[in-house]
Image: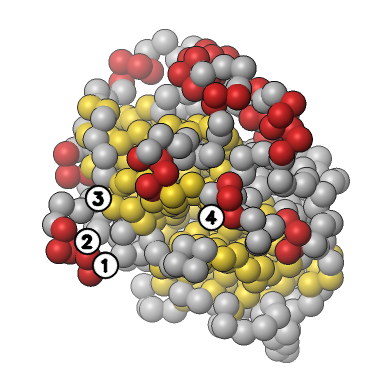
C-alpha cells in the first residue's frame, strides 16, 4: 500500500479527494459545529447538548437532506453537484493500465431497489480516517451498539439512546493490563488507529506504525498492546477475529511488512506467522475457519490454508491492488474489492475465473460486508456511494445509497436489521443508519 507520512493525524483523504466545506457559502462556515482540534475534550467534540444537526426518517420524508446539507444555501444544487463529482473525482490507483475492456466484463445490474430505508443520521459522532486506502473503521455488534474511530478515540454510539461514549483513548500512554511470562506486551504512546474490528466483546485495533491493541469491552483498560514490527513502513492494514477449526478464538493481523500474524485471543501469544512476497492489505477467514483470503500489493488475490499458510489458489482478474474482501456465510463465495473499481465474486468450487464482476460508480471498492443470513452484500467506495446487492437475485438487483463524503466504514448489525455507514468529513462527518425494509407491519412492530 502507499506509504503516508502521518505526523499530525489528519484526514489524509483530503489530499486526494474533497471536503464538502469547499462548496459552502460563508453562512455555513460560520455555523460549523465541529472543530478539527484533535486535542479537544471529547465532550466538546460530541456537543452532546446540541442534536439539532441530526436528521430523522420523518424529516427526510418531508424533504430534509439525510445528511443535513442545506442545499438551498449552497452554490450548487444537489443534482448538479453530483454530476460534477462524477466527472471530476479522481480514483487513486497504483497500477494505471488500460481498462478499456473492464466494462465488458461487468455484470449488468438493475438499480432502483430499496432493501434498507434511511432511519437516522447523527453528527454527534464524527468518524475519521487515518490512511486513505483503509476503511474498516466501523463495526456494529448489535443494532443498538456501533463502534467507530474518531481521532485518537474509539467511540460507542447507541442508536437507541442517541448517545455517544468514548471506550478507548490512545492519544496518550496506553499500558497493557494483562501480563504473562514471555509476553511481548509493551506500552504504546499516541497511536493513530488505521484499522479495527469488534466481535464477541473483543475490540482489536491496528496502528499506523505497526501497533496492535486488544481490549475486552466489559473490562477497564487495555488487555494487550504491542508493536508487532519495526519496519519503516509498518502500517497495520487489517485485523480480524475468527474461530479456527478447533474452536479457538484467534486474532489475525495483516501488515505492510508482508507478514500475516496469528495471535491467540486469550493469551495474546503469537501462534503463527505467514510470509508473502508483497504487503498484505487485507485478509478474511472463511466461515469454517479453513481458508484465508490474502489480498495486497498485487493484481492476484490468494487463498491460503488457515493452518499452514500454504497458498492453495491464486485468483486472477483484478488490474490493481486489492484492499477489501468478505466471505458469504455459506463459505462458497468470496468477494474481493480492488482499486480497478470492481468487486469480483469467486466460487471456491471453481476458482479458475471470477463468477461475476460488479462495478462501482466512480472509484475503488474499499469495504465489503455480507449480512449474516447471506441475503445482501454491501460494498462501499471511498466516497459517496454504498451499493447493496440482493444475492438471491444473482447480484442483479441493487440499491444505491448516494451521499457526500469519505466513507470510513460500513457494517450490518448481526441480526441484519440495520446498516450503518460512517462518513468522514470536516463539516458533515456523521453516522448514517438504515433499517431493513420489511413488508410485514406486524413484524415491524415487534423488532
Q: Residues within 10 Å of mark 1 (few under 14, many from 20)?
A: few
Contact between labelled residues 2 and 1, with CB atoms less than 8 Å apart: yes
Q: Nearer the viewer, mark 4 or mark 2?
A: 2
Q: Nearer the viewer, mark 4 or mark 3?
A: 3
- For marks 4 and 2, give the CA distance: 26 Å
Q: Count numbered badges in the picture.
A: 4
How is the structure coloured here?
secondary structure
* Residue 84, percent from left and from top: 54, 14
* Residue 191, percent from left and from top: 77, 59
For the N terminus, which image quadrant? Answer: top right
N-terminal-most mark, 4 or 2: 4
Horizontally, residue 70 falls left or right of residue 227, namely left
Contact between labelled residues 4 and 1, with CB atoms less than 8 Å apart: no
Horizontally, residue 143 falls left or right of residue 208, namely left
Residue at 77% over, 47% down: 35
Residue at 48% over, 47% down: 55
Q: Residues within 10 Å of mark 4 (few under 14, many from 20)?
A: many
Q: Nearer the viewer, mark 3 or mark 2?
A: 2
N-terminal-most mark, 1 or 4: 4
Residue under circle 4? 138
For the C terminus, which image quadrant? Answer: bottom left
Residue under circle 3? 437
Under circle 1, the secondary element is loop
Horizontally, residue 286 falls left or right of residue 48, namely left
- For marks 3 and 2, give the CA distance: 9 Å
Residue under circle 2? 444
Q: Nearer the viewer, residue 150 or 235?
A: 150
* Residue 190, percent from left and from top: 82, 61
- For marks 1 and 2, give the CA distance: 6 Å
Amino acid at each position: 500500500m502507499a506509504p503516508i507520512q502521518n505526523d499530525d493525524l489528519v484526514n489524509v483523504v483530503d489530499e486526494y479527494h474533497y471536503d464538502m466545506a469547499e462548496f459552502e457559502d460563508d453562512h455555513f462556515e460560520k455555523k460549523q459545529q465541529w472543530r478539527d482540534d484533535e486535542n479537544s475534550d471529547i465532550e466538546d467534540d460530541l456537543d452532546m447538548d446540541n442534536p439539532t444537526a441530526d436528521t430523522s426518517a420523518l424529516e427526510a420524508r418531508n424533504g430534509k437532506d439525510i445528511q443535513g446539507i442545506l442545499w438551498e444555501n449552497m452554490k450548487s444544487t444537489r443534482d448538479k453537484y453530483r454530476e460534477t463529482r462524477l466527472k471530476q473525482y479522481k480514483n487513486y490507483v497504483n497500477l494505471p493500465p488500460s481498462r478499456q475492456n473492464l466494462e465488458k466484463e461487468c455484470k449488468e445490474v438493475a438499480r432502483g431497489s430499496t432493501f434498507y430505508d434511511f432511519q437516522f443520521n447523527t453528527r454527534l459522532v464524527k468518524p475519521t480516517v487515518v490512511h486513505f486506502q483503509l476503511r474498516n473503521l466501523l463495526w456494529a455488534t448489535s443494532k443498538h451498539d456501533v463502534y467507530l474511530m474518531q481521532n485518537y478515540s474509539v467511540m460507542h454510539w447507541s442508536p437507541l439512546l442517541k448517545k455517544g461514549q468514548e471506550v478507548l483513548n490512545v492519544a496518550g500512554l496506553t499500558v497493557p493490563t494483562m501480563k504473562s511470562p514471555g509476553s511481548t506486551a509493551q506500552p504504546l504512546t499516541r497511536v493513530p488507529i488505521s484499522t479495527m474490528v469488534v466481535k464477541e466483546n473483543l475490540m482489536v485495533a491496528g496502528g499506523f506504525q505497526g501497533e496492535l491493541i486488544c481490549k475486552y469491552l466489559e473490562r477497564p483498560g487495555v488487555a494487550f498492546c504491542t508493536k508487532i514490527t519495526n519496519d519503516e513502513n509498518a502500517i497495520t492494514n487489517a485485523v480480524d477475529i475468527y474461530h479456527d477449526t478447533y474452536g479457538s478464538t484467534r486474532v489475525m493481523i495483516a501488515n505492510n511488512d508482508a507478514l500475516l500474524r496469528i495471535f491467540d485471543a486469550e493469551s495474546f501469544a503469537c501462534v503463527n506467522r505467514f510470509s508473502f512476497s508483497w504487503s498484505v492489505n487485507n485478509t478474511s477467514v472463511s466461515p469454517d475457519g479453513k481458508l484465508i483470503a490474502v489480498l495486497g500489493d498485487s493484481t492476484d488475490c490468494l487463498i491460503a490454508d488457515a493452518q499452514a499458510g500454504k497458498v492453495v489458489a491464486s485468483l486472477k482478474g483484478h488490474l490493481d491492488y486489492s484492499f477489501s474482501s468478505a466471505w458469504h456465510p455459506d463459505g462458497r463465495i468470496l468477494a474481493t474489492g480492488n482499486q480497478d473499481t470492481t468487486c469480483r465474486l469467486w466460487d471456491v468450487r471453481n476458482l479458475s475465473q471470477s463468477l461475476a464482476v460488479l462495478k462501482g460508480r466512480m472509484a475503488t471498492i474499499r469495504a465489503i460486508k455480507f449480512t449474516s443470513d447471506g441475503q445482501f452484500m454491501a460494498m462501499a467506495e471511498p466516497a459517496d456511494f454504498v451499493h447493496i446487492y440482493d444475492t438471491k437475485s444473482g447480484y442483479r438487483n441493487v440499491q444505491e445509497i448516494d451521499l457526500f463524503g469519505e466513507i470510513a466504514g460500513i457494517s450490518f448489525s448481526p441480526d441484519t436489521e440495520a446498516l450503518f455507514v460512517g462518513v468522514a468529513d470536516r463539516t458533515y462527518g456523521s453516522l448514517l443508519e438504515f433499517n431493513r425494509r420489511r413488508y410485514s407491519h406486524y413484524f415491524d412492530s415487534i423488532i
